[in-house]
Image (cartoon, helix red, strand yellow):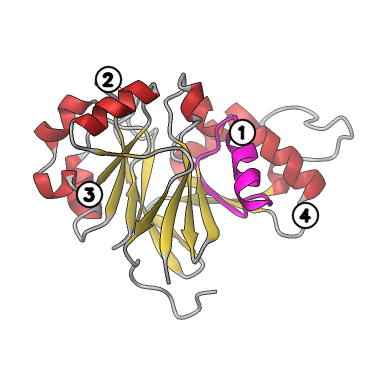
Amino acid sequence: MQWTMHALGTGAAQAVELGNAAAVLEHEGRPLLLIDCGPDVVARYRQAYGALPTALYLTHLHMDHVGGLEALFYQLWFEGDRRAPCKLFLHAALVPLLQARIADYPRLLAEGGVQFWDAFQLIPCSRGFWLHGYWFELFAGRHHRAQSAFGLALPDCMVWTGDTRPIPEALAVHAARGERVFHDCGLLPNPSHTGLEDLAREYPPDLRARLVLYHQASRGDADKLRAAGYTVLDPGQRVVLPQPAHVADDAG
């Protein structure tokens, strides 16, 4: 019953060498949920799995996290199973913003007669969502404006913070049972992202030992975080996770 997190890309918006930050939660080697969909993510996903994603969670709507949605739409519509559209989970507060940013375009196809949402099953969430019998929890991050970015937790298994400043209050709840915590962290802090100096100030030693850092500006920055004693995620890497909790009776 092995669970793994497979990093497709680990970089900040400008870090072309590291790829757009995105990962796939896997169960027994099979992709269960894609987290974020930047411009290069669909190609990386297809290279890894030979197929298109069936479930996607978006942490927030900056283009390095959603810029691949148009490519995914086209591939789902022309190549996918139109009777089984990709499930797209995101916090309900982000739905009108996503509609305005990506979906509200006249005559998306030259052939006409197609909405962006025809290729997706939109599932707005607030506290969380069920997927294959497992309950995933959402929590607010600290990235630009309030209520504009939301992390994801699978209890007892993993936490993915999304882009964020330190969030000790959220992790005290969602990372309290030994979960592996995938955390935004570059070398230098700024008003929207965590930096190296933030970690020791904001988080206790036992939590820092479970951090896996991503969203660096370069490989050199990633190496400096490793030299400081932290685990840093590499593109293509798989991290083994603890077993999640509370599978529903009708899990499939």
Residue furthest toward the right?
111
Answer yes or no: is residue 143 visible.
yes
Q: CA distance from mark 2 to mark 3?
A: 24 Å
Q: Is residue 107 above or below residue 76?
A: above
Q: CA distance from mark 3 to mark 4?
A: 40 Å
Mark 3 neighbour density, 10 Å: few (under 14) some (14–19) many (20 or more): some
Amino acid type at mark 1: Gly
Q: Is residue 221 above or below residue 115?
A: above
The answer to whether mark 4 and mark 1 are in CB contact below 8 A is: no
Q: Which mark is residue 26?
A: none
Q: Which residues are magenta?
A: 36-58
Mark 1 neighbour density, 10 Å: few (under 14) some (14–19) many (20 or more): some
Residue under the image location 85 percent in, 39 percent down: 113
Quarter of the figure that contains the N terminus: bottom left
Amino acid type at mark 3: Arg
Number of numbered markers: 4
Mark 2 or mark 3, which is nearer to you? 3
Mark 3 or mark 4, which is nearer to you? 3
Q: CA distance from mark 3 to mark 1?
A: 30 Å
